[in-house]
Image: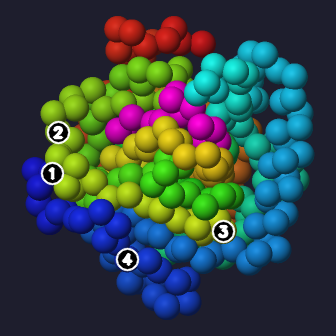
Amino acid sequence: MHTAGCRCKEGNHLMLASTQHTSNQQRAIYEQQGYLIFPQFLEEGELGILRRALADVLARAEGLTSSNEWFSLVKARDGAGRYVRRVANPNALHPAFHEIVFNQKILDVVESLIGPNIQLHHTKINLKPPSRHAGFEWHQDFASFPHTNFDLLAVMLMLDDSTAENGCLQVIPGSHLWGPRDHLYSRSTTYSSRIEDESVIPDPSYWVRVAVPAGGIEVHHCNLLHSSLPNSGDKPRSALLIQYRAADNVQVGGLVAHYGSGMLVRGELPYRVRMIEGNFGVLSPDKRTPNSPPRL
Ligand SMILES: O=C(O)CCC(=O)C(=O)O
């Protein structure tokens, strides 16, 4: 099933410039591949504001020795010290991360993919310190917050250059068409998941590394299988993730306590729920790989 039409060589994907493609073309690529890349998306000034905001937010984590509701920490590769691995709900912590959620250029892309009525689901910042713990196993986002339909996507905005060395995203093009799969909590963290039946993951010749420069964005469908390796280089890889959904798409499981979740960012509330047919597993506390850390 997964082999149909998705054999891709590493890096062989379409790089879009927001002005070069019509929204119909963007949508057609997204429907076929499950992801889009815009390597030059933000102006330098816009990127600068976000990078300064990140520095301000991280200043609040100085001196922390264990994770809290905002900051998840991991041990450095050499064991000396701890790094912030994830900032939860940065839109609650800094006005720049609140405002970027309403960025009209981003919302134009999102509208071309999931329609005119758009809600925020959540934001987070994933930091990739040089740590063996900083990878993500193959997963679909849908499993962590299932909804009544699949018009749910992530915009990943690169705050640093993301490269093969520092653990850029990797995807399996077309895998969103396989539908939602059962997941377990990941082996290494308490807040991410991995596909339960790893035998469906095709061989590495189908994997595509998505290296995107700072200021660029990658957009992926909630059922696209994606992962990323730990940072094996010496440069950080920070990325802001903004998850949006169509306003007629209602969450039916998983974590709901995100700051600003359900906020209408464009269009209007349709007061309708659109449901697709099918059934899917919801992550429950017992869905753990035997050696995965205890659920927080
Ligand atoms: O930051 C990454 O490399 C992957 C992020 C991701 O897949 C997630 O947070 O669900």
Q: Tags 3 and 2 in contact by the CB under 8 Å rule?
A: no
Mark 3 crowdedness (10 Å alpha carbons): few <14, some 14-19, many ≥20: many
Labelled pair 4, 2 in contact (Cβ < 8 Å): no
Chain-order first, disc 2 or disc 1:
1
* Quadrant of the image containing the C terminus: top right
Q: Residue at x 77, y 75 (%)?
A: 44
Closest to the camera, between mark 1 and mark 3, is 3
Total of numbered circles in the picture?
Answer: 4
Q: Are marks 2 and 1 in contact (CB under 8 Å)?
A: yes
Label 1 SS:
loop
Q: Earlier in the sequence, mark 4 or mark 2?
A: 4
| Position of residue 229 measured from the top left corner of the image (x, y, whole percent) | 44, 41
Q: Quadrant of residue 117?
A: bottom right
Apparent side of residue 288 relative to residue 155 in the rendered image (left or right)? left
| Circle 4 residue | 14
Q: CA distance from mark 1 to mark 4?
A: 20 Å
| Residue to which mark 1 is pinned | 2
The answer to whether residue 235 is magenta is no
**Residue 197 on image: x %, y %:** 21, 29
Q: Which residues are magenta?
A: 127-139
Q: Please indicate, yes or no, whether residue 63 appears anywhere in the rendered image.
A: yes
Quickly name the residue at label 2.
Answer: 200
Q: Give the answer, above or below, for where 283 lies relative to 33.
A: above
Q: Is residue 271 visible?
A: no
Which residue is drawn at the image coordinates 66% and 35% (left, top)? 86
Amino acid under disc 4? Leu
Task: Mark 1 and mark 3 in contact? Answer it, CB < 8 Å.
Answer: no
Q: Nearer the viewer, mark 3 or mark 2?
A: 3
What is the spatial separation of the Cα atoms under label 4 and label 2, in whole angstroms? 25 Å
Residue 254, given in percent of the width and then of the height, sits at 50, 28
Residue 191 vs residue 116, the one in the foreground: 191
Specify whether residue 135 is painted magenta.
yes
